[in-house]
Image (tube, rainbow, N blue to C red):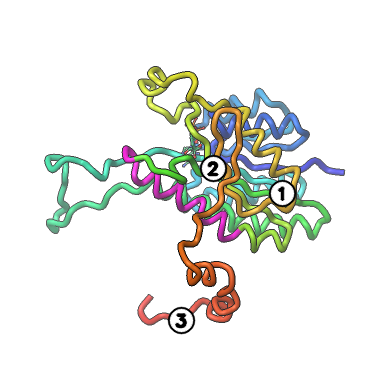
């Protein structure tokens, strides 16, 4: 029986490194996918022969598609688990002061740098798209289970005014998992989001890490606790799991405010299904 195979993006550091190490210790072959060559190679070589570093920029579809193909082939035509975890904070401040605003040659305000959305949300959507494809192929060969975990954040449940794009991307990740998880589980793929509170990693500015009170730190072990929950229960899907200190909390979506919204939430599916049998044709786009 071949070993199960996992891709972890952003595994060169922090949460991804911790999950990759945990899966490795559970007998997985692990692909360390990271933009950072040095840290990615270091993590893979510390783990051992069943770890492979593949330098990847998740914000490039071509790069991620190559990652999945190579991982699947290296794993023996098998892929079981993907943690879409790579993430960055805001690269340009939407509140930028007037003196920093720049115009192009046409006199138009230059586009806001939205790399955060590409890495934190677009790449997760494309990752799920690629994962589904390779899990289906894995099954043709008799292997391949389907666990997809995406890293959202507590900022995806509340908000972080210092990083509005980060907040928006993390809300998006939860929406993606809640909407797709209950459907994908019908073909044996679970899709869940983790929403960590503060974990001191390379993501956070050093001055924040220095000042942060110890009692409000969440340890990396709590992330692995959530991963173990998902692995232990093939029916757990569409969940947003908040991680705070040593605890994990399954967070429900908002309550419906009235009966009409409840009807739409619980009973309108058949009508929507009819409307979306094929993507609706629209004029002009
Ligand atoms: N640390 C926290 O407190 C915290 C809380 C909530 C959510 N998160 C989320 O956890 C995830 C992991 O962050 P972390 O805290 O471990 O940070 P980290 O900076 O330690 O690790 C992130 C890794 O992602 C890699 N990366 C960045 N852009 C990439 C790209 N385009 N392609 C591939 N790899 C790329 C980096 O090189 C790095 O190794 C992120 O999605 C982050 O938003 C972190």
Question: Does the segment drawn in magenta span residue 189?
Answer: no
Secondary element under disc 1, as helix, strand or loop, is: loop
- Looking at the image, tell me whether mark 2 or mark 3 is earlier in sequence order: 2
Front residue of 135 and 214? 214
CA separation, marks 2 and 3?
33 Å
| Percent coordinates x, y for residue 178 in the rendering | 56, 56
Q: Which of 120/61 is in front? A: 120
Query: Bounds of the magenta span?
Result: 161-180
For residue 151, the mark is 2
Residue 281, label in figure: 3
Position of residue 124 measured from the top left corner of the image (x, y, whole percent): 52, 50
Left or right, residue 208 beside residue 68? left
Residue 166 on the magenta span: yes
Badge 1: residue crowd in 10 Å (few <14, some 14–19, many ≥20):
many
Disc 2 vs disc 1: which is toward the camera?
2
Q: Are marks 2 and 1 in contact (CB under 8 Å)?
A: no
Q: Is residue 210 left or right of residue 46?
A: left
Whole-number angstrom distance, CA of label 1 to CA of label 3? 35 Å
Q: Residue at x 14, y 54 (%)?
A: 105
Q: Is mark 2 within 8 Å of ligand 1?
A: yes
Q: Identify the mark nearer the N-term, 1 or 3.
A: 1
Q: Say the numbered circle drawn on residue 79.
A: 1
Label 3, secondary structure: give it. loop
Image point (49%, 43%), residue name:
57
Label 2 vs 1, first from the N-terminus:
1
In what element is the residue under mark 2? strand
Query: Callout 2: 10 Å neighbours few (<14), some, many (20+)?
Result: many
Across the whole image, how many numbered discs are drawn on residues? 3
Quadrant of the image containing the N terminus: top right
| Extreme-front residue of the structure | 258
């Amino acid at each position: 029986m071949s070993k199960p195979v996992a891709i972890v993006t952003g595994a060169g550091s922090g949460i991804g490194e911790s999950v990759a190490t945990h899966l490795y210790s559970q007998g997985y072959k692990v692909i360390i996918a990271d933009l950072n060559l040095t840290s990615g190679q270091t993590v893979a070589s510390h783990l051992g022969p069943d770890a492979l570093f593949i330098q990847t920029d998740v914000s490039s579809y071509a790069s991620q598609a190559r990652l999945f193909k190579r991982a699947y082939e290296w794993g023996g035509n098998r892929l079981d688990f993907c943690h879409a975890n790579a993430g960055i904070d805001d690269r340009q401040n939407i509140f930028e002061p007037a003196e920093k605003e720049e115009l192009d040659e046409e006199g138009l305000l230059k586009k806001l740098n939205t790399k955060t959305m590409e890495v934190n949300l677009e790449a997760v959507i494309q990752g799920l798209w690629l994962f589904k494809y390779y899990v289906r192929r894995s099954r043709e060969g008799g292997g391949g289970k389907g666990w997809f975990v995406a890293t959202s954040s507590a900022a995806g449940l509340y908000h972080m005014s210092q990083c509005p794009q980060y907040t928006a991307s993390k809300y998006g990740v939860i929406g993606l998992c809640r909407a797709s998880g209950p459907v994908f589980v019908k073909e044996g793929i679970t899709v869940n989001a983790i929403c960590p509170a503060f974990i001191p990693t390379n993501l956070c500015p050093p001055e924040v890490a220095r000042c942060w009170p110890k009692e409000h730190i969440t340890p990396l072990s709590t992330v692995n606790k959530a991963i173990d929950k998902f692995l232990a229960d093939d029916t757990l899907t569409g969940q947003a799991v908040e991680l705070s200190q040593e605890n994990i909390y399954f967070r429900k979506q908002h309550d419906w405010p009235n009966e009409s919204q409840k009807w739409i939430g619980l009973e309108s599916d058949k009508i929507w299904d009819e409307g979306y049998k094929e993507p609706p044709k629209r004029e002009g786009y």
